[in-house]
Image (cartoon, helix red, strand yellow):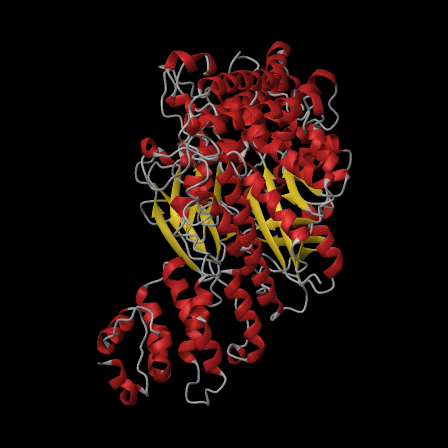
Amino acid sequence: MTKGFLNIVLHAHLPFVRHPEYEDFLEEDWLFEAISETYIPLLDRFTALLRDGVKFKITMSITPPLSEMLVDPLLQSRYIKHIEKLVELSEKEVIRNKNNPDFYDTAIMYRNHFKNALEIFKNVYGGNILNGFKYLQENGVLEIITCNATHGFLPLINSQEAKYAQIKVGKENYKKHFGRYPRGIWLAECGYDGEIENILSRENLNFFFLDTHGILFGKPHPKYGVFAPVKVKENVYAFGRDGESSEEVWSSQRGYPGDYYYREFYRDLGYDADYEYIKPYLHSDGVRRNVGIKYYRITGKVDLGAKKPYIPQIGLEKAAIHAGDFLGKRINQVHHLNNFMDIPPIITIPFDAELFGHWWFEGPMFLEYLLRKIHYDQDIIETISPPEYIEMFHEKIEEQKPNPSSWGADGYNFVWLNGKNDWIYRHQHMAEDRMVELAKKFPEAKGLLKRFLNQCARELLLAESSDWAFIMTTGTTVPYATKRFKDHIHRFNKLYEMILSGNLDENYLKDIENKDTIFQEIDYRVYAG
Amino acid sequence: MDNFFSSWIKFTKTENVEEIKELEGKKFPIESEKSEIFIDWGEEIPDYYNKNYLRILYQDPYRIFVYWELDIDTISKYFNDMGNKLILKMHNLTDNITININVGNATSWWVHTTPDKKYRATLVVKRENGEEIQLLRSKTIETPRDCIYWKTDEHKIFSRENLNFFELFTISGALPINWDFLEKLKNYPWDEPLFKVPEILLRYLPLWLKLILRQLNLTIPLSFFIEYILKVYFPQELHSIILSGENIDVEKLEEILKTKGYDFTLPIQSSSSSNMKK
């Protein structure tokens, strides 16, 4: 008999990166790598489980920018070019390693991996893999939810109108892609400031997720800890992350992904190969970068040069062992919790989807093994989606006002507000105020003016992406994040001035419309409140 | 029991910040080589909007970021006179405390705060004669809590009905006690029969002490405070409670506690101090 539930949440997000103005643009690789390494492997594994009759349920947020990129014809055709080159390279690698037993199996694995990605992308889904996720949802194994429009970090968005627009645009965009409204929402970075439940209730978004302390430090203290949701408003429930199980997977030190037999992320053929050999597979600037073929395993705390060859079969076995270990721990956890709860606990485990496959290469297989073991090996735990749990136990769920929090480092707003990025908010908040001003001033705009106003809304939303502030903090690709933030604010301000002066330069608008194509369905009046 | 629980102590946010940052950073790969000489930092954005505004954002329970701008008219009206100073006033509305910061020509400021309080900022001009004129007022915000919200009747804290709560909280990975709790512990009527106390306290305090030390960055003397109580009141169970394995110097502990504002003398000290000093 089922004694407890597992609520696995995969949050798939990438910022909107699309540069038609360049032939070749480095940051578009984020999407391409995620498609080959995460989205297709997850689709592939989930589809296999469905085909085999394995009963499972996964909640997945696919953010609006990601959906918009996945259906974009330009990015789709660029992805096909990208993956075709990788197939070509991986075929050369099979030949090159023919007499090298250390690497031959791995070379074959990559060739199959990339060929499979190309086949699924091009021939199974006709370039639009969103259809694959949609299919899984329609078959009852995925609960796809939306996210606020551009993954804006809501606690640092100033005006209520701008917060509302983030949520409303995200909801409408979901409908465009999935044919119905979402039942729940992933608040970007689990950012919760105590001011949005009215909006969620009004928009009929029935559930969202918080980090552990969002629930634990809420008012009043939660009767069930994080092992049941809390009701924050009529028809709106918050689920808190279970710290224990999350850490087993997340932690790079103690977590499963750090196992010495798993594939090493940082030792890449892009750096190891002869330059002339690898050059055709690098970007046009010819700088050595990761190409996605990696022959080594983590090995231990050793220099990259001392890594040992990866053995695909052992990697898979490890994933199976870890899935078994994880399930065993969850069963113990549930048994223990049963002593203290009068309803079955729900263990909520949210992850960035890109952890699986991209960073933790064996991650999709871990998930598959876990779901198979849950289905075949035991009857203590079941996977469940939030609406199903709410439906079953809503009478026992207690009301609470959660504590403002996020799942970022330190648990609050630090990652998105510190000395490295505090300068952006002056500009973002000014643009929010100006957008609200425009929406109120022009309640019924038509034609060219309407296009200007809609583009203003797009530029503001793009500037609000939490990714820019995040990158400024982590220090990874700071110039690009800075450029993106400033470009969108600049474009917004220029459009705003043109609108107020009545001097509408259509050529300028067209250029921007062509670049920032996100949310073709947008209606600027969402900012009128 | 300790082994069992030790496997649950995983909610160590602060400890793992660097690790988490490192992991999160991997989503956007670090570029180790750059061939471009030209770096595109984006298009121009305004240095100044010529508006009046004052906004307040919390970073976490302990820090607030305040930023503002004064338009040209306001500046020329008040600051052509050299003697006038721009003062940022941070009002803790919950405790009715205001701090004044002479901000000079700055347009933003980071201010230390305390958790779970209402704050509002105002910008004022202070004239040489001491007169103050308010220019701008921010909206009111509330800093988040950094610990559990306690409103339970203090005499019920240690009751059996709270056992489930303590258990679920602890295995959720957080510390089900806070400053108020510690205050209550301090004021607990220790002379009354303690039969209700030991089970829960003995079960969780060692774990909570570890959590205090590891994740909340509280001062060590504070956790010593609890350890001290335990050692004084439950000397028989010392073997299961000792955290560090080190002996504690009672005089020194009292000295530390006094510097922290705890006027702390236990009536029972004389009878058990032999256990404390080995």
Q: Residue B111: x percent and y percent?
A: 39, 48
Name the residue nearer the viewer: A288 or B235: A288
Q: Residue at x 56, y 57 (%)?
A: A328
In the rendered view of the protein, which quadrant contains the N terminus of chain A? bottom right
| In the rendered image, the vertical position of residue A249 relative to residue A224, given as above or below | above
| In the rendered image, the vertical position of residue A508 relative to residue B33, given as above or below | above
Q: Residue at x 63, y 68 (%)?
A: A341
Q: Residue A523: x percent and y percent?
A: 71, 28
| In the rendered image, the vertical position of residue B52 relative to residue A504, given as above or below | below
Q: With B246 as the anchor, is A282 left or right in this view?
A: right
In the rendered view of the protein, which quadrant contains the C terminus of chain A? top right
Name the residue nearer the viewer: B269 or B29: B29
Q: How many labels, in total?
A: 0
Q: Residue at x 68, y 34 (%)?
A: A169
Q: Residue A245: x percent and y percent?
A: 53, 53
Q: Residue B121: x percent and y percent?
A: 45, 48
Name the residue nearer the viewer: B173 or B83: B173
| In the rendered image, the vertical position of residue A430 relative to residue A405, given as above or below | above
- Residue at the extreme top: A507
